[in-house]
Image (cartoon, coloured by chain):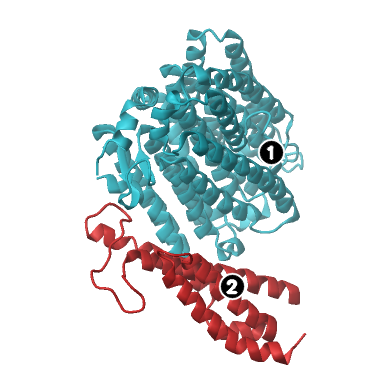
Chain colours: A red, B cyan
Amino acid sequence: MYSIILATASRYLLLLLLMFSVFLLFRGHNEPGGGFVGGLVAAAAYALYFIANGIEAARTIVRFDPLRIIAVGLLMAITSTLPSLVAGERFMTAVWFDTGIPLIGKVGTPLLFDLGVYFLVLGITLTIIFSLAEEDRS
Amino acid sequence: MNRIIMLPILLPLCTAVIMIFFRRSIALHRILNTVSTALMLGASLLMLGSVRSDGILSLQVGGWEAPFGITLVADMLSSIMVVATAFIGFTTALYSLGAIDRKREHYFYYPLLQFLLMGINGAFLTGDIFNLYVWFEVMLISSFVLLVLGGRPQQLEGAIKYVTLNLLSSSIFLAAVGILYGTAGTLNMADLAQRIPLLDHQGLLSVVAVLFMITFGVKAAIFPLFFWLPASYHTPPIAIAAIFGGLLTKVGVYAIMRFFTTIFHGQDASFIHQALLIASAFTMVVGVLGAVAQYDMRKLLSFHIISQIGYMIFALAIQSPLAIAGALFYIIHNIVAKTNLFYLSGLIRRIKGSWDLREIGGIYRFYPMLGVLFLVPALGLAGIPPLSGFWAKFVVVKAGIDSEHYLLVGIALCVSMLTLFSMIKIWNEAFWKDDPRGEGGVEGEEYLRTPSVKKAIIVLPIVMLGCLTVAFGLWFEPFFELADRTACELLDRGAYIDAVMGERS
């Protein structure tokens, strides 16, 4: 069922929700939030867009193959473990940069790991949503 | 040196991620899968060598100290199990090259195999109970997908039983973890080993121990919790069935071994050992009786897994150093022989086009060498000297007699006879008798279409595993020495606790 109100709103909501998901991601280290919640919110944003505009439109706007997003997320998570090895610390020890970046705060490997989780959750949820949508259509 | 503990977990993870990136390039998947498992085998052997010469390795992940963070521990037991996993992973990688169809390869067969190996290795190497739960889930979820890959109705039917019972056991596991944490305030295995004798709530701890026994009993397919195994293991393609049959149940046995030597011990655990003894007798008998009645090769072998688990549990329940060493040797011998038999049944099916022993025959006339390759693991499993099974059973039986469990020893020996009988049944039906369809040798179309390079790749792992079965038998001494050292280390526990709790980086 096509609703012009939802379709119009979803375009703006998509952007807002994605921004909110990134906010949740950065907030996550010391406060409620983090990669998992952020990824879910981002996936929910695309899910809303899909409900309003159909599967084809949603696939176009995601642009990447969700499976590739999963792989990127996993790769980021693995990469976040490398600095600990280079620094000669025990495996997966967090490595932080001394200077912080405005708005984001301190930057280190846990952020990269969280980013990996973000993409992983986004990719998996999108894969599930798209597969179910295809199933429904056929 | 202790960073090497991460390798058996990281290698398959990285490989799987690269494979997902290049999902369309199946050739790359095949190469990566083979190379990665070979590297894993090398790394695990290195780890075993290091543990053997320098003692237990431990790694506090992320630099969080022992009772608070996650610890990875490689003691003798873990390292040996990881070596076995890597070896079976490598042979399965080879066998899959020849035996897995294109469609499954496109649907992430190889990445899933890597994730499965990662889960198994993680379960062997972790020193934290909640982490063990997580690795179990990694392993189970990969195995769920591998089980249904292909989507035939028969597979889905088997998977429903497999998934339901395993999820049930996982929730029991989680409940037990919760109660244990509430009682003891820690989930680190070494820390628990120290604290449990000092706790007030010994009654509650017995409940937790029983819950753990049920959980791992389901995973290891002990009587009366084995129903899911024969209902599901015959449904996936043989390469998957082989790695399931060879390795997955042994992870359950490993967990029982770890829990009821390192963590729960002393007078409190004697009740558990009684229960395990009784369960082991039923497991041996029911498993082998189920096997004798089957005519489908895969079902026959699936029931055999259960029966063999009985021997391991029997040895574990005796708890003497000799018995633990015997149990470990038994696990390794069984992983090798059982996986090999699954491969062979796949090859027989390929040649003759059927799983049903009544419909096939006459293989010996045309492929006498295949007969030899079959007899090695088959007689090895039954326990004919000089093959590995003889020593495994000899040690277990000796430990049983030493501890005066005469009835159980009697049962074990009778079950051995029945095992031999069921192996001879496969031999008689598939190899010896004439093909009931006449003409002396009808070959399956699948086999005729298989190019000879693929045939060679399928036979290679069978030969490798067969050689290992013979080697275990002929050079029993060095292998048993390893097992013996492992048993002493497990029962002593001091070294394990020191390696984890005493600060070493």
Residue at 73% over, 35% down: B295
Q: Nearer the viewer, residue B450 or A109?
A: A109
Q: Quadrant of residue A107?
A: bottom left
Q: Chain of mark 2?
A: A
Q: Quadrant of the N terminus of chain B?
A: top left
Residue at 39% over, 26% down: B490
Q: Is residue B313 above or below residue A108?
A: above
Packing grade of label 2 (10 A; few <14, some 14-19, many >=20) is many
Q: Position of residue A1 (x, y in %)?
A: 77, 85
Q: What's the amino acid at mark 2? A: Leu
Q: Nearer the viewer, residue B427 or B222?
A: B222
Using the image, tell me which numbered label, if any, was put on residue B230.
Answer: 1
Q: Nearer the viewer, residue B179 or B450?
A: B179
Q: Chain of mark 1?
A: B
Q: What's the amino acid at mark 1? A: Pro
Q: Quadrant of the C terminus of chain B?
A: top left
Q: Is residue B253 left or right of residue B77?
A: right
Secondary structure of the residue carrying tag 1 is helix
Secondary structure of the residue carrying tag 2 is helix
Q: Nearer the viewer, residue B37 or B374?
A: B37
Using the image, tell me which numbered label, if any, was put on residue A126.
Answer: 2
Mark 1 and mark 2: span between their CA atoms?
36 Å
Residue B41 visible in this rendered orientation of the protein: yes
Q: Position of residue A38 (x, y in %)?
A: 50, 71
Q: Is residue B404 left or right of residue B423?
A: left
Using the image, tell me which numbered label, if any, was put on residue B124.
Answer: none
